[in-house]
Image (cartoon, rainbow, N blue to C red):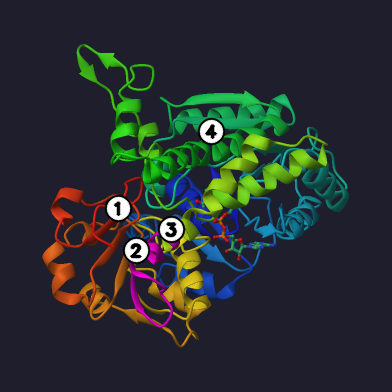
Amino acid sequence: MNIIIVGVGYVGLVTGLCFAKLGHQVYFFDIDSNKINRLKNGKLTFYEPDIKELLIETKDVVHFSDELNDLNDYEIIFICIGTPTTGNGIDLSYVKKSAEKIGSLLKEGRRYPVIVVKSTVLPGTTKNIVLPILEKFSNKNAGKDFGLCMNPEFLREGSAVEDFLNPDRVVIGSFSDKEKKIMGEFYTAMFENADIINTNLTTAEIVKYTSNSFFPLLISFSNEVANICEIAGEKADAEEVLNALWLDRRISPLIDGKRLKPGITHYLKAGCGFGGSCFPKDLRAFIQFSKNLDYKPNLLESILYVNDFRITNLIKRVEESIGSLKGRSVAVLGLSFKPDTDDIRESPSIKLISELLMRKTKVKAHDPVAIENTKKILGNEKNLEFCDDVFDALKGTDACFVVTSWEDYFKISQDDFKKFMKDTVVIDCRRIYNPNNMNKIKYIGVGLKDDFEK
Ligand SMILES: NC(=O)c1ccc[n+]([C@@H]2O[C@H](COP(=O)([O-])OP(=O)(O)OC[C@H]3O[C@@H](n4cnc5c(N)ncnc54)[C@H](O)[C@@H]3O)[C@@H](O)[C@H]2O)c1
């Protein structure tokens, strides 16, 4: 099929390149001409495994442009525009602008193109905002002259290509039966094993918010358990508690005597909180949406509440152990919100660094790929130094927060910490080290009571 992708960010680029790999012709349109020029020259705009190879593999069937003048040759138009946070809600101005553009081009259209909202938008947006704009600017009718669908995206940064090419399910909210059929056939041809969920526009929108509430719920639940373990009498360990929890066969069934470890267990782990471009933003928006309907979602609010205090709690633990961090030197390992991405949006590390800088702490930061993005927002901070080498970051520091579980950090031994650091307080924010191998330093593990002399 001939497809247009409107908005060539994380979701747009991955979506379009995967469609191209699966046999479709893809026209990418973005108003950011720098981004388009980079992509035209084969240069990526963000770090993500497998995407570079995909860009090379699909170069003959994709086209990048900062102009969109005609929809006539295209059957499906995907809106993959950003929906950033404004206060507690989402900024729909970009989505609206793109709908106006698509609407005005639909005016001249001859066939029945399907417009698909892939951006995460609040329940009711596709029907009550996008649809009227498309109809107004095209002077045409949805369901008669063009189709309208809401098709949320579930890819995860760091494994986006893999996720996209192997979907668990495809959710298609449709305005009318005609586009339901078109989109159903489109996806079934590519992903014959995936469950296709056909529904209405609003249900599709809520599926996405539910998904992006459920996983943070598990994370905050685990962190709540960690908070309790950290202060419980005998040396309680949240890691062991949560491992024992998931061994319940209602979570991890035994099949032919073998234990199945479902992906959900990945979220049943103590840490320093979630971040990224989606979980915090979508939770805040979903909470505000509910409140606007006069419903107070106490459980959803608690997820954010637990998350917001995670970093502050960790700093407090360090200060209780070695005194004020003011004027001291601290290493922060990992800037991206998770490994295998250079995305630092709402990353716990950024929050940590900001809190440390406020305390007048000198920070030495390392990340394999996210330093450039961090410099864009914190590059002018005189107390923040970026280090390309992880051991340079450790040199002369009093404490080290290991925030992102990049593989490079697993290899650091307590002898390395001892060799390079001045004092050896190591805060393992992801529990990547075995505490027994860290018994010669001041090891602080999330979900674990401290076990060193203060
Ligand atoms: N990043 C993720 O992991 C992820 C996963 C699932 C869903 N989502 C959702 O998908 C949507 C896109 O997210 P993203 O992370 O790809 O955003 P992004 O910020 O990386 O990209 C958005 C792109 O839209 C472009 N744009 C803005 N206005 C435009 C217009 N009028 N016409 C054409 N292009 C325009 C921007 O220049 C930018 O390149 C959001 O709603 C997000 O919540 C994101």
Mark 1 — residue?
A: 450
Magenta region, residue range: 316-332
- Please provide percent x and percent y for residue 303: 57, 42
For the residues labelled 1 and 3, the Cα–Cα distance comes to 25 Å
Q: Secondary structure at mark 3?
A: loop
Kindly indicate whether the residue at mark 2 contacts the one at mark 1 (C-beta within 8 angstroms).
yes
Mark 4 residue type: Phe
Q: Nearer the viewer, mark 2 or mark 3?
A: 2
Q: CA distance from mark 1 to mark 2?
A: 9 Å
**In the figure, is residue 167 to the left or right of 86?**
left
Left/right of residue 142 with respect to residue 351 in the rendered view = right
Residue at mark 4: 186
Q: Quadrant of the C terminus?
A: bottom left
x and y, in percent, of residue 259 in the image: 24, 21
Front of the two marks 1 and 3: 1
Toward the viewer: 268 or 320? 320
